[in-house]
Image (spheres, rainbow, N blue to C red):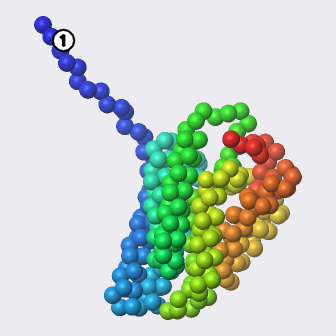
Amino acid sequence: MSKQQQPPVYPDEPQIPILPNMLTAGNLLCGFFAILTIYQGMYVHAANNAAAAAIESYRTATYLIFAACAFDLLDGRVARMCKADGPFGREFDSIADVVSFGIAPSLLLVSGVLHELGTIGWGIAVLYMLCASLRLARFNCMAAAPKKPNQSMDFVGLPVPMAAGAVVSTFYLVSYFAGQGTVIPTAWQYIMAAGMAIVSLLMMSRVIYPSFKHVNFEKKGTAMAILLAAIAVLLFIHNPEVAPAIVFLCYLLYGLIIRPFLTRRMRRILEVKDDDDDETADQA
């Protein structure tokens, strides 16, 4: 008599917290609508040769990518506050980030700038998208690994949302000063292409960037941190076209050039860290 076949056993369904994953869904939707808006600009430009309308669509896409950055900033923080961070949220967040901060910025730069450079432009856009995807996969692997004693919460390599913000804000700034309906100057096309290539490599680098995950409403701030935050708010109010590029560029240069030469005390002041916060400058 043959042994009775056992029914298949499936893994347990993951727990899905509502609020943080709704914010992640907002990130994903912003990226999706940014892509649709970029395609709309491409269609208008190709069908009617209306460069001004196309540029306006591309600028709308930058707003949507900035909104995705805001959702991405909030979802992880809300998950930690609710003690609801887990593998499902991490994977969902990475999928949303690939769309909003990998595909959307690449498509935006190809449509607005890099297509003028031919194969070089397309190659840089592909490099950026691949580096963003690999950076997210590497981050998930490191986050899932067992925690080491005294492990830092800082990022290894430029975070993907900040890379997207740097690329998109630069495009927005250059297109704003170029004026309505005008082509971005050739010199700026090459500068933006080089900048996008550098940002791509920084995502896969081992440069340490602060995560600010330890900052919360209960933590005491420093005078320097409050001053820098106030300056950033004033920039956004009085110069909304320039402020995003300055903020993202400062973050990029801070980890690449400034942070390695700062003392531990200066890092705690600028990054709003307490003495109890874990920090290792040579995180693996």
Outermost residue toward the top in this view: 1
Classify residue 69 by image quadrant: bottom right
**Residue at image location 37% in from the left, 33% down from the top:** 12
**Residue at image location 19% in from the left, 18% down from the top:** 5
Residue 203, image x, y percentages: 61, 56
Q: Nearer the viewer, residue 230 or 69?
A: 69
Q: Quadrant of the N terminus?
A: top left
Residue 276, image x, y percentages: 78, 42
Three-letter residue code for mark 1: Lys
Q: Is residue 242 visible?
A: yes
Is 217 placed left or right of 176 in the picture? right
The answer to whether 202 is drawn above or below residue 274 in the figure is below
Q: Is residue 85 visible?
A: no
**Residue at image location 54% in from the left, 56% down from the top:** 131
Q: Quadrant of the C terminus?
A: top right
- Looking at the rendered structure, the secondary structure element under dot 1 is loop
Outermost residue toward the front in this view: 119
Q: Nearer the viewer, residue 211 or 219?
A: 211
Classify residue 160 by image quadrant: bottom right
The answer to whether 205 is drawn above or below residue 163 in the figure is above
Q: Residues within 10 Å of mark 1 (few under 14, many from 20)?
A: few
Please tell me how many numbered marks the rendered image carries: 1
Is 222 placed left or right of 107 in the picture? right
**Residue at image location 68% in from the left, 50% down from the top:** 206
The answer to whether 187 is drawn above or below residue 262 in the figure is below
Residue 30, image x, y percentages: 45, 67
Please give the residue where the numbered disc 1 appears in the rendered image: 3
Outermost residue toward the left in this view: 1
Residue 185, image x, y percentages: 59, 87
